[in-house]
Image (cartoon, rainbow, N blue to C red):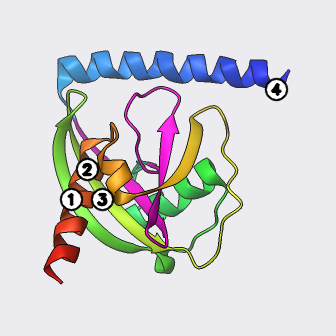
Amino acid sequence: MNGAVDAGFRVLYRTAYHVLRSYWFVRRPHTRGTLMALWQGDKILLAKNSYRVPYTLPGGNVEGSERPEETIVREVAEELSVQLRPEQVRHVYHGVHLFEFRHDEVDIYEAVLDRPLDLKIDGREVVWVGFVTAEEALSMNIVPHLREYLERKKAGEAKA
C-alpha cells in the first residue's frame, strides 16, 4: 500500500513541476532557493528528485521572511530526516542562473559530517541520495548551481 501512495505522490510532484515549468516559461520569474552540500571526507551527498532529470543537492525555496540558513535546515530535515542547526552550516556559494525558464538565485551551504548519517528519504520528492566524489558529480547531469560550486571549489583547491 505504501508503495502505491508513494507512486501517487511522485505523479503529483511531476505534474506540479510541469505546471510550474509552463508558468516559468511564460513569466520568467526570479526564484530564490538554498542547497546543502553535505561532505563526508572527499564525497558530497547528491540527491535525485522524482520530478527532475538532473541531480542536485538537498534543498528548497526560501519561504516568506525565512532566512536562507533557516530554509536549508528545514529542507534537510524534511528531505533527509537530518537535524542541523543554523550555526552548523557555512555559506559557500551565491549565484543566479537562467534555469528552467527562471532566474534562479541560489545559496549553497556546506557542512562536513564527522560520522555516517542514517539517511531517510521520503521516496516521494526525493527518490535517491548517495555520496560521490566531486569529479564523479561533475561527470553527471547536475543542476547549474551545483556545477559552478564544484568547479569553483576544485579551482580553489588547485590554487592551494
| Mark 1 in CB contact with mark 4 (< 8 angstroms) | no
Point out which mark residue 128 bears: none
Q: What range is drawn magenta here?
A: 30-59
Q: Earlier in the sequence, mark 3 or mark 4?
A: 4
In terms of secondary structure, where does tag 2 sit?
helix
Q: CA distance from mark 2 to mark 1?
A: 6 Å
Left or right, residue 157 beside residue 67:
left
48 or 124, which lies in front? 48
Amino acid type, label 4: Asn
| Residue 30: quadrant of the picture | top left
Q: Residues within 10 Å of mark 4 (few under 14, many from 20)?
A: few
Left or right, residue 17 beside residue 149:
right
Amino acid type, label 1: Glu
Q: Residues within 10 Å of mark 2 (few under 14, many from 20)?
A: some
105 or 138, which lies in front? 138
Q: Position of residue 137 (x, y in %)?
A: 36, 50
| Mark 2 in CB contact with mark 3 (< 8 angstroms) | no
Q: Position of residue 64 (x, y in %)?
A: 40, 51
Left or right, residue 96 beside residue 92:
left
Residue identifier under label 2: 147
Q: Earlier in the sequence, mark 1 or mark 4?
A: 4
Residue identifier under label 4: 2
Residue identifier under label 1: 151
The image shows residue 149, relative to residue 78, as above or below, that is below
Q: Earlier in the sequence, mark 2 or mark 4?
A: 4
In terms of secondary structure, where does tag 3 sit?
strand
Rendered residue at 48%/15% (across/down) = 15
| Mark 2 in CB contact with mark 1 (< 8 angstroms) | yes
Q: CA distance from mark 3 to mark 4?
A: 34 Å
